[in-house]
Image: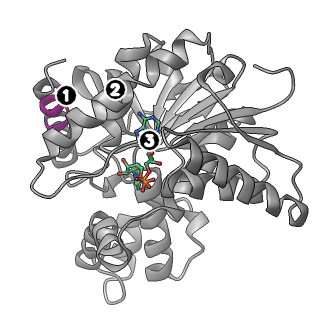
Amino acid sequence: MSGNKKKVVLIGTGLVGMSFAYAALNQNVCDELVLIDLNEKRASGEAMDLNHGLAFSHSSMKIYTGAYSDCTDADIVLICAGVNQKPGESRLQLLKRNYDVFSSIVPKVVQSGFEGIFVVATNPVDIMTRITYELSGFNASKVIGTGTTLDTARLRYLMGEYFEVDPRNIHAYVIGEHGDSEFVPWSQALLAAKPIKDVLDDNPQTYYMEELEKISEEVRGAAQKIIEAKGATYYGIGMSMVRVVRAILQDENSVLTVSVRLRGEYGGKKDVFIGNPCIVNSGGAKRVLELKLSESELKKLDDCCNILNDSFKNLSI
Ligand code: NAD
């Protein structure tokens, strides 16, 4: 760590990385931001562009392109480098290529003497986070994925619209895989301090479970819809990354649905990295909050864990 200065190294200055960087600058989230990309020319152009906006911001952030040696005293290394799916390529083939990308990144970060927290956003994020954990040899608490933070934000926004309540007063989570098997454990959802189930029971003519299920479908399909409309998603994830980074740098003890390694929760689930509410602070993932899920919700979580475990094992690394 660099004294009191908060330093973040961003690896991958594509659409997601730079959406993070732009939001980080506007929210003044750190003192120093280092940009690294395989495409060095692009990274240097991005650093110039951001620096030219400094005069209009409230930040005096130091932004520059760097090398892996810059990770030595960083608080956070944020990875959103990756390759895109080629036509006809399977998810597993893409995963293998992203494994190769991470093999060329994570060992270099570790060799720098980095002792901070890894935050991963590259997809499939739960598996890439597990790969980062394996490649780094770090304690699991120091390796976090963005998990279902963005999905949870989308859920709260849509529930806020439905109930006409500020999304900040909606306490509901999307958990599991950041992907097709993710789900909303409705048994755990609250409007302020009132269980959603009670809200439905008290207002049978106004609110319906079927509508809430449609909302959870909409959340699950949101990324695809955005990709169809504009080719990629990046602003929302960039802001989610800023949220996770701030929780770490400010030692907030905030509860976020990051991707974390399970250690025996939910009836002995181990090793798998999955989106679940977790207390996040300067030490990374401080504590996983095990939810009291219903039987059907536990079955869905089981499915998520199996899917993620199978994908990881199929990589045969
Ligand atoms: P992009 O193609 O715009 O950027 C990827 C960048 O990674 C490129 O600049 C490329 O040069 C760089 N890169 C590739 N290999 C590298 C290496 N070995 N070392 C350093 N840099 C390398 O892609 P994007 O739109 O920014 O997306 C990045 C990742 O974020 C993708 O995996 C995408 O699926 C993921 N994503 C995650 C979420 C989420 O919720 N977790 C949401 C959106 C996108």
- Dominant SS of magenta comes to helix
Q: Which residue is mark 3?
A: 81
Q: Is the shortest distance between ligand 1 and the CB of mark 1 under 8 Å? A: no
Quarter location, residue 166:
bottom right
Quarter location, residue 93:
top left
Q: Is the shortest distance between ligand 1 and the CB of mark 3 under 8 Å? A: yes
Contact? badges 2 and 1 (CB < 8 Å): yes
Screen quadrant of the C terminus? top left
The answer to whether residue 292 is visible is: yes
Disc number lying in front (3 or 2)? 3
Chain-order first, disc 1 or disc 3: 3
Marks 1/3: CA–CA distance? 19 Å
Q: Which mark is residue 312?
A: 1
Q: Amino acid at mark 1?
A: Phe
Chain-order first, disc 2 or disc 1: 2
Tell me the residue at 55%/59% (across/down): 193
Q: Amino acid at mark 2?
A: Arg
The answer to whether residue 171 is visible is: no
State the image coordinates of residue 89 (x, y, percent, origin top left).
12, 50
Task: Check disc 3: other Cα within 10 Å, few if <14, some if 14-19, many if 20+.
Answer: many
Chain-order first, disc 3 or disc 2: 3
Q: Which residues are magenta?
A: 307-312
State the image coordinates of residue 267 (x, y, percent, origin top left).
23, 24
Q: Which residue is mark 2?
A: 130
User: Taking 231 as reference, is 50 left or right?
Assistant: right
